[in-house]
Amino acid sequence: MIDPKKTGACISQLRRQRDWTQSELAERLHVTPQAVSRWETGESFPDITTLAEIARVFRVSVDHLLNGGAGGLFRDRSRTVAGELAQEIAEGNLDQASKMLVEKKADFQSLIELAPLTRPSTMDAVIEKMKGFPFSMEQIVELAPFVSQELLSELVEGVVDGKMNRELLSSLAPFLSRETLDTLVHRVMEGEISPDFLMELAPFLSKNTLNQLVEQVGEGRLSEEQLEELAPFLSKEALDSLVDRVLKGEIQAELLSGLAPFLSTETLDRLVDRVWEGSVERVHIEELAPFLKAETLERLVFEAVDGKIDLRLLESLAPFLRREALERLVDRVSEEALDANILVELAPFFSQSALQKILGHVAEGTISAEVVVGLAPFLDKTMPTELIRNSIRAHPPEDREAA
């Protein structure tokens, strides 16, 4: 492992042995004194060409600098190999550098350590001369920040499904070109790569590519579960297209719950409009409820009250209704437009003021007193007493003298 502090200390020692100032060394290397200062303190590291030039100026080897000047038993063999590889690359002997890697005289990690110090064009040239080398997915991920997109595309195309995994592909995706990403998606569609990898690619795919993926749903190439994973990255047009296919019966309606968090208000309203038409079942509207706006929910509730849609929908919508809407339901019961038993089912969602309102209607006789038993677990302790008082006020006993 290259250690900037050790190499920096070695440069500093060699400079001081020659009684040179940082400015004098900088002049010989055609860099700024500040650059020399940062090298010596380990704050930065010279690129590979400059490193070779420093070695030439001090008449030492590159591996001497990488080893911090250590020799004999204290010499780090990995740094020695990295130094030899660096020397070949710095001197433009790229054939020899590639040969060292292919023949494993230098390990791949030595190249990765030198990569931040090497120009991308030089890295490309070294890798291109390693034709036929079986790069692993892990090695390609390590190379990704240091080579061109074109070369990276070639390396990725040589990887088969069995050598890929989601974590590695996730690390690689940000460095891939749009064309390479589209090629990978095509390989998924052709069955060469598992669709499970799509989630790692999705944030980087183009709108057109994502739209093409949507078209594959229902054709057996992409499951609805995998489509739900892609939903956060789909455009409004693509999502609307999927909803239309659900309404036409081309795709299972169960997909709606996975898409719901990403659907527009207009699309959700359109789905609600289809409830009483029978295109969307009650159970699916229940799944959409957390994402519907308050006005839409209330419209559904009162359409259920009016008998236009299944009354059982009320209980599932109740957790998402505003307090005002629930209190309006109490009024509908008192007007005998709704069975009083529905109040018991909705009781867990009523506020204390709504419960107080129900008891007021019971005292007036506009709601059956039988509901009080069902409401009891949710009533404030003082409410039953208040109910009795209100009942007496509403129906005072006949004057005893008149009796």
Image: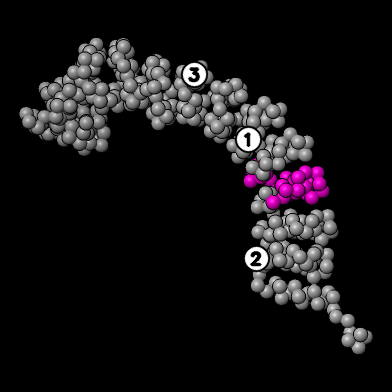
Q: Residue at x 81, y 46 (%)?
A: 307
Q: Is residue 176 left or right of residue 98?
A: right
234 in the magenta segment: no
Label 1 – label 2 distance at C-alpha = 36 Å
Q: Main secondary structure of the magenta part?
A: helix
Which residue, given by chain and number where applicable, does mark 3 sit on?
A: 191
On the image, the x and y values in percent for residue 59 come to 11, 22
Q: Is residue 33 left or right of residue 367?
A: left
Which residue, given by chain and number where applicable, does mark 2 sit on?
A: 377
Image depth: mark 2 or mark 3 in front: 2
| Front residue (pair 207, 104) | 104
Helix, strand or loop status at disc 2: helix
> Which segment did they paint magenta?
288-315
Amino acid type for the residue under numbered disc 3: Gly
Which residue, given by chain and number where applicable, does mark 1 sit on?
A: 254
Q: Residue at x 33, y 21 (%)?
A: 136
Q: Residue at x 55, y 32 (%)?
A: 225
Around disc 3, counting alpha carbons within 10 Å, would you say few (fewer than 14), some (14 to 19), or many (20 or more)?
few
